[in-house]
Structure formats: structure tokens, C-alpha cells
Image: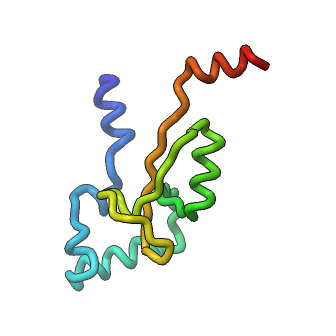
Amino acid sequence: MSLFESLKEIHRRPEPFERYMAADLWTDDHISEKMLAFHVDEKRTRTIYNWLQYFSPESLQDEFEKAGFTEYELFGNVAGAPFDVAGPEFAIVGRKRPLRDKAEEENRV
């Protein structure tokens, strides 16, 4: 087996996820029954990767500051709507301090 084939096999989606079927998952009785049975099978071990992480505006501003961002602005969504503290989502856009400024600052100390 070639390296390409090995990598392709390693990254192959598990059988229930081989095709995009989100629209059918819970609207088709047969598919939803099979998906539910697959997910609640106590004999199986599962690895779940969750890329979703929830931040508050304050905690994300904290993360930005720790990462060296000196300017940032909050928006109500990724399209740039005005930020609303009661809104269901938000986005943050930041500007990182140029490297030369960091170097100059370190040399002053």
C-alpha cells in the first residue's frame, strides 16, 4: 500500500459518515433510527472531536491580550453587525502588535 493510500485509509470517515447527510439524519425515519442505534450502542468505544468552544466576550478579550493583540473590536456576528451583549453570538477582530515593536520594547527593558 502506498503512503497516499495509507493516509487516505487513516482519514477515511466511519461508515455512517461517508456521505453528507445532515438534512436526512433526523427527518428520515430509517436513517434516524440507525444513527441513534449507532450512537447509543454501549458495546462501542467512541472518540469524539469537538472543535466548538464557547467564550464570553471578556474571556476572549483576555485570550487576545495574552496572545499579544493590542487592538480588538467586538461585533455581533462574523458579518460585522454591531455587538449586542444580549445577542446569541459575537465575533472579535484583532490586530497584533508588529514584531519590530515587540523587539524595541524588549530592548528598552
Quadrant containing the C terminus is top right
Question: x%, y% of residue 86?
Answer: 48, 77
Q: Which residue occupies the foreground of this view, 39 or 78? A: 78
Q: Is residue 6 above or below residue 38?
A: above
Name which quarter of the figure residue 88 lies in.
bottom left
Q: Is residue 65 above or below residue 97?
A: below
Question: x%, y% of residue 61?
Answer: 59, 53
Left-right relation of 14 to 100: left
Left-right relation of 31 to 84: left
Q: Quick one: which residue is furthest to the front in this view?
A: 108
Question: x%, y% of residue 96?
Answer: 52, 34
Q: What residue appears at the point 22 percent right and 66 percent down from the top-left corner?
A: 21
Q: What residue appears at the point 48 percent right and 44 percent down from the top-left corner?
A: 94
Left-right relation of 47 to 26: right
Question: x%, y% of residue 83?
Answer: 43, 65
Quadrant containing the N terminus is top left
Q: What residue appears at the point 57 percent right and 64 percent down from the top-left corner?
A: 56
Q: What residue appears at the point 47 percent right and 52 percent down from the top-left corner?
A: 73
Q: Quick one: which residue is furthest to the top in this view?
A: 107
